[in-house]
Image (spheres, rainbow, N blue to C red):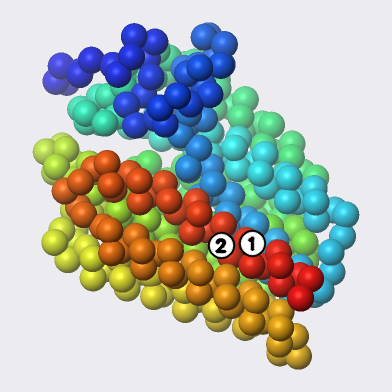
Amino acid sequence: MPDQPPMPEAEGQVSDAVRGNWVDRLAPKPARPYFRLSRLDRPIGTWLLLLPCWWGLLLAMLSDGQTRWEDLWIFAGCGIGAILMRGAGCTWNDITDRHIDGSVVRTASRPIPSGQVSVGQALAWLAAQALVAFAILLSFHPMAILLGVIALGPVAIYPFAKRFTWWPQVFLGIAFNWGALLAWTAHRGVLEWPAVILYLSGMAWTLFYDTIYAHQDAEDDALIGVKSTARLFGETSPKWLARFMKLSVALMVLAILAAIPRAETLTLVVAIAGALGFVGHMLWQLRLFDPDDNDRLLMLFRSNRNAGLLPVLFFAVALFA
């Protein structure tokens, strides 16, 4: 393993964490390495896992026109579950990637390769997060529970995908957008086609934002033999990003049309406006995309929280249209 670069700060702050984040400022020192394993100092991943859940729940509510008190718990439970399962997934990712991470400048400061946490400690932390998340899942509809258990497969496979395919972002999309299926089913009690179409929209979105993200590591990945869509597309990335953007918004509009009764014209218009705002944000990202500017790449990647919140906002307004 090559010599590791010095840590950004003496206390072990991870290099790509948000500066001045609450973990580095406020969390108890013994807990900080574990919170860093869970990416609590980098919340964008939690948002990207959570937002498809809220899409699925709100579109299900629009589909049957029912808003129940239990939907508040589904909304909150998805939020808590996203924090826990993103944390568990990232912990698993760091365990499996510990040797690769030590060879990449951006990731060498992570808790395991930097020596802040042992593999055994990380495994115990992984189990604790997964068990609490499972307890929350048990409060949902039985069909949603089944979907939640099935989701463990893609989560377990994803860290290995970059070793055997140029399209690891597909596996990330499978795992990160599962909440659209689960939350729809938690409300409706059955998995239906609009949720599946919305799920596919989220997968195309993941290919969009994670290709942007992967360009940060393209050079290091080439040196160590790690595959990604960023390396696969190279200079043609803008064309591919445009394709993913168009596919994502087209599928989202189709999901809306499939879910909302045609008689609800105003509801349809407001919901589709959310999809248009979503694609408008991605167009802005595409205009600013520069594969050689890592600071801009990270900024654009993080901005997808706002992109994904736009459908949430418009779907919520559509409930009262």
Viewer-nearest residue: 288 or 187: 288
Q: Label 2 amino acid?
A: Leu
Q: Quadrant of residue 206?
A: bottom left
Q: Residue at x 28, y 58 (%)?
A: 288
Residue 187's spot in the image, x, y percent?
A: 77, 61
Viewed as shown, does residue 286 lie left or right of 321?
left
Q: Quadrant of the N terminus?
A: top left
Q: Residue furthest bottom?
A: 263
Q: CA distance from mark 1 to mark 2?
A: 5 Å
- Above or below residue 104? Residue 270 is below
- Above or below residue 49? Residue 189 is below
Q: Quadrant of residue 310?
A: bottom right
Q: Would you say the residues marked 1 and 2 are in contact, meaning their CB atoms lie under 8 Å apart?
A: yes
Residue 181's spot in the image, x, y percent?
A: 63, 62
Q: Residue at x 48, y 43 (%)?
A: 45
- For label 2, the SS is helix
How many labels were placed on the picture?
Answer: 2
Residue 126's spot in the image, x, y percent?
A: 54, 27
> In this view of the protein, can residue 226 be seen by the observer?
no
> In this view of the protein, can residue 311 be seen by the observer?
yes
Viewed as shown, does residue 156 lie left or right of 266?
left
Q: Which residue is mark 2?
A: 310
Q: Which residue is mark 1?
A: 313
